[in-house]
Amino acid sequence: MDLEPDDDQLDRAFLALADPVRRRIVARLSRGPATVNELAAPHAMSLQAVSKHIHVLEQAGLVTRTRDAQRRPVHLAPEALERLTAWIDRYRLIHERRFRTLDALLTPPQEQEP
Amino acid sequence: MDLEPDDDQLDRAFLALADPVRRRIVARLSRGPATVNELAAPHAMSLQAVSKHIHVLEQAGLVTRTRDAQRRPVHLAPEALERLTAWIDRYRLIHERRFRTLDALLTPPQEQEP
DNA sequence: GTCGTATTCAACCTCAAGGTTGATTACGAA
DNA sequence: TTCGTAATCAACCTTGAGGTTGAATACGAC
């Protein structure tokens, strides 16, 4: 599994989630695939605009598309979400471990939580 | 702990990470605080540009700043990173749980989507 | 006070993100 | 074949992100 995506992929994925419309789309898709029309319904904007948002999510690898007659159902691609948490957690944990180490060095020997 | 940040905070935080320069800054800060000059050194751009990047990270809640004479050390704010993984994981897990349920209901042992 | 260092403020430029509307393609149904 | 539905393409507009340079501010050292 490629858990070290290149800069460009991370750029696109984080940028894709930096928009409330696209986050709502992701939230909706977490409950199952949907068509463009279904995804557009709750949003007060043109179908074309929503179509563009989906395109952004697709380029970021966050969703995939299949074909069903003239419909193009959109599916969540959870591996991409996983890569994002992997990136974030990597540095979050480095930071936390460093903090614990400092604590261990600076504080008199004492009870530590598991 | 507020693990349900409003749209605006999520916008800013995801947008902040959607830039390789800012991600490198976060990576650097995971190993400890640093001044603007130190953060700018590895980047082939003006100090002012890096200062702006730091401002973006600060507005997103991802870093905080202290004062030390004329220096303004930048510190990582790991809680903000935690909020991001919380958002992502929420929908990733909804999706996965749904998938497992569907699998249990629908599949005789067989190939589905990759 | 004056000087050097650290950082920000301000004005400016360029380009792409996110929206609009109108035309076009792709497909199933009748 | 024609019609209706689903979705995309294309042209356009506005705004803000990310960079530049030059001036201003804040502080410690001398």
Image (cartoon, coloured by chain):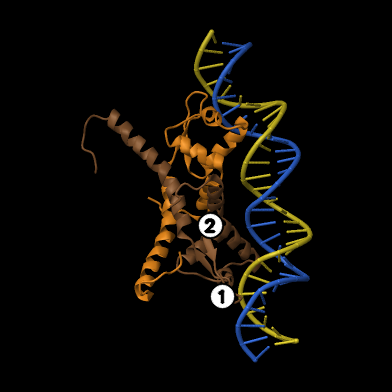
Chain colours: A brown, B orange, C blue, D yellow
Q: CA distance from mark 1 to mark 2?
A: 20 Å
Q: What residue appears at the point 30 percent right and 33 percent down from the top-left corner?
A: A103
Query: In this rendering, does residue B41 appear at all?
Result: yes
Residue under the image location 46 percent in, 69 percent down: A32
Q: Which mark is residue B55?
A: none
The vertical placement of A71 against A100, above or below, is below
Q: Residues within 10 Å of mark 1 (few under 14, many from 20)?
A: few
Q: Amino acid at mark 2?
A: Gly
Q: Which mark is residue A61?
A: 2
Tell me where residue A42 appears, x and y as whole percent. Answer: 56, 69
Comparing B56 with C27, the one in front is: C27
> Is residue B84 something one can see in this rendering?
no
* Letter of the chain that mark 1 sits on in the rendering: A
Q: Residues within 10 Å of mark 2 (few under 14, many from 20)?
A: many
Q: In the image, residue B17 lies at what x, y percent?
A: 52, 45
Please indicate whether residue A10 sits to the left or right of residue D12 in the image: left
The answer to whether D7 is drawn above or below residue B17 in the figure is below
Q: Nearer the viewer, residue C16 or A41?
A: C16
Q: Position of residue C12 (x, y in %)?
A: 75, 38
The one of B41 and B50 positioned closer to us in this rendering: B41
x%, y% of residue A46? 65, 67
Q: Secondary structure at mark 2?
A: loop
